[in-house]
């Protein structure tokens, strides 16, 4: 008998997970799956990471401890908003021998069709990452062509002088950065340019 964990999430405290839980429990009963745990995050966005979703984090810990065989969720958006995050999550749970059932989408990764669907999602996630990279590159090239300065603004000339003076007095780069409230990379750049 499959050991199942149900994960439910609502974005606002005014919403209820009861409908999600009731329907998923009925599916588990029909499939003769044993519900061994239920995890519910209330008032938390799916865009948040594990640290901001304590019950999702506990679910992941249960996966790591191999306490479950299948995760049930009402919909893919209950698990997360980013396709890339979802594909990564699926890879992590599959590495532990855990499958995923998404009720609204009718996806069960313990079946060949379900696995194929999620593999296609992985392809689309990679495509999405590539498209984002291309848009960023095009945007940077356009900004540069329009004469816009790219990168962080330079520090004031007075700060650059303070860096050079502190360095000639033998002060370390980290100490200079701390003292002036700037990054060590900035200190290194100023010192290198002065050499």
Image: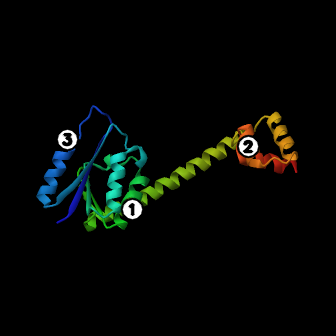
Element on which disc 1 rests: helix
Label 1: which residue?
92
Mark 3 → mark 2, Cα distance in angstroms: 53 Å
Q: Report how far apart the C-alphas of labels 3 and 1 lie in the structure.
A: 28 Å
Asked whether the beta carbons under mark 3 and mark 2 sit within 8 Å of each other, the answer is no
Q: Which residue is mark 3?
A: 18
133 or 90: nearer the viewer: 90
Return the residue found at the far top.
Answer: 14
Q: Which residue is mark 2?
A: 177
Give the x, y percent position of residue 48.
Answer: 42, 44
> Is 107 situated left or right of 56 in this image?
left
> Label 1 near label 3: C-beta < 8 Å?
no
Give x and y (percent) for residue 163: 81, 41
Answer with left or right where residue 169 lies relative to residue 149: right
Q: Secondary structure at mark 2?
A: helix
Q: Judge from the rendering whether residue 117 lies leftward or rightward of residue 37; answer left or right.
A: right
Q: Which quadrant holds residue 87? A: bottom left
Tell me what residue is drawn at x 32 percent, y 54 percent: 59
Q: Nearer the viewer, residue 138 or 126?
A: 126
The answer to which of marks 1 and 2 sits earlier in the sequence is 1
| 186 shown above or below 107 | above
From the viewer's side, name the closer residue of 133 and 52: 52
Q: Residue at x 76, y 37 (%)?
A: 155
Circle 3 SS class: helix
- Across and down, in percent, residue 15 comes to 26, 34
- Point out the frontmost of discs 3 and 2: 2
Spatial CA span between label 1 and label 2:
39 Å
The N terminus lies in which quarter of the figure?
Answer: bottom left
Q: Are marks 1 and 2 in contact (CB under 8 Å)?
A: no
Could you tell which of marks 3 and 1 lies nearer the N-terminus? Answer: 3
Note whether residue 49 is visible: no
Q: Is residue 59 visible?
A: yes
């Amino acid at each position: 008998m499959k050991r199942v964990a149900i994960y439910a999430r609502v974005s606002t405290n005014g919403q209820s997970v009861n409908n999600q839980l009731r329907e998923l429990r009925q599916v588990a009963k029909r499939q003769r799956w044993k519900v061994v745990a239920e995890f519910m995050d209330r008032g938390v966005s799916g865009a948040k990471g594990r640290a901001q979703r304590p019950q999702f984090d506990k679910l992941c810990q249960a996966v790591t401890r191999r306490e479950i065989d299948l995760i049930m969720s009402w919909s893919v958006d209950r698990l997360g908003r980013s396709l890339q995050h979802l594909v990564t999550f699926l890879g992590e749970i599959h590495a532990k021998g855990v499958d995923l059932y998404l009720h609204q989408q009718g996806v069960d990764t313990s079946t060949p069709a379900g696995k194929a669907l999620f593999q296609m999602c992985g392809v689309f996630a990679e495509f999405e990452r590539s498209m984002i990279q291309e848009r960023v590159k095009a945007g940077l090239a356009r900004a540069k062509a329009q004469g816009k300065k790219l990168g962080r603004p330079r520090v004031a000339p007075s700060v650059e002088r303070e860096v050079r003076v502190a360095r000639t007095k033998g002060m370390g780069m980290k100490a200079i950065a701390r003292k002036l409230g700037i990054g060590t990379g900035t200190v290194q750049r100023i010192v290198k340019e002065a050499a």
